[in-house]
Amino acid sequence: MALGKSHDAVNLLFLPLPLYFLPKEFYIPFTLGYLIGTFFLSPDLDLKHSKPSRRWRSLKVLWLPYQKSSRHRGMSHVPILGTFLRLMYLNLLVVFLYFVAIGVLYTVSPHLSYPLLSFDLKAFFDHLAKSESSFYFLLGLFLSEVLHMLLDALFTFRRIL
């Protein structure tokens, strides 16, 4: 789809529809997940020069290994699996950077690393896994991905005709 403009516009136009069916207390986590999925964690992150990749600005280099290991419209465009792969990649990256930060801070000055060492990363991820807000955030991510893929399928079908 041309420069992703259609994906962004259609996703934004579609957003109010699922909100009608959700409990009001979960509008914010769902909307955040949906918007992050639309603009930053799109299936098109597998393309080096896609709009979602460019939105990461200088941090787009973090997605280079993901892009090297993915082909466009491959696993990243499989519903649920694509979102799961991008989230797992991002989680692994965060955990890796967490430990790098601990190592660097400990090397510079051991007492600076204590706040990071006292942070319970496992408990944090456990809390997120059990949170109802996290479910609605993931639902937003998933729905934005499904809509993206439907648009890709429609565009491809239209091109075939």
Image (cartoon, rainbow, N blue to C red):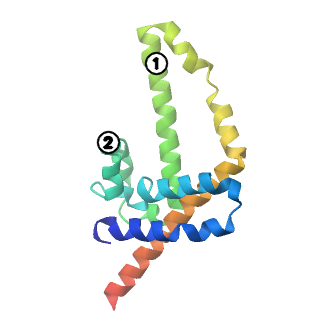
Q: Residues within 10 Å of mark 2 (few under 14, many from 20)?
A: some
Q: Residues within 10 Å of mark 1 (few under 14, many from 20)?
A: some
User: Measured from the top left, where is residue 6 in percent x and y?
Assistant: 36, 71
Q: Secondary structure at mark 2?
A: helix
Q: Which mark is residue 65?
A: none
Left or right of residue 128: residue 106: left
Q: Give me the residue at 42% from left, 78% from top.
A: 153
Left or right of residue 137: residue 144: left
Quarter of the picture containing the N terminus is bottom left
Write down the quadrant of residue 31 in the picture: bottom right
From the image, tell me which residue sits under label 2.
Answer: 61
User: Measured from the top left, where is residue 27 in percent x and y?
Assistant: 63, 56
Left or right of residue 160: residue 121: right
Q: Give me the residue at 40% from left, 74% from top.
A: 152
- Separation (CA) of disc 1 from disc 2: 21 Å
Q: Nearer the viewer, mark 1 or mark 2?
A: 2
Q: Amino acid at mark 2?
A: Val
Write down the quadrant of residue 160 in the picture: bottom left
User: Measured from the top left, where is residue 32 in percent x and y?
Assistant: 54, 52
Left or right of residue 105: residue 52: left
Closer to the camera, 99 or 30?
30
Q: Secondary structure at mark 1?
A: helix
Q: Which mark is residue 103?
A: 1
Q: Give me the residue at 33% from left, 67% from top.
A: 5
User: Measured from the top left, where is residue 30 in percent x and y?
Assistant: 60, 56
Res. 39 in view: yes
Res. 80 in view: no
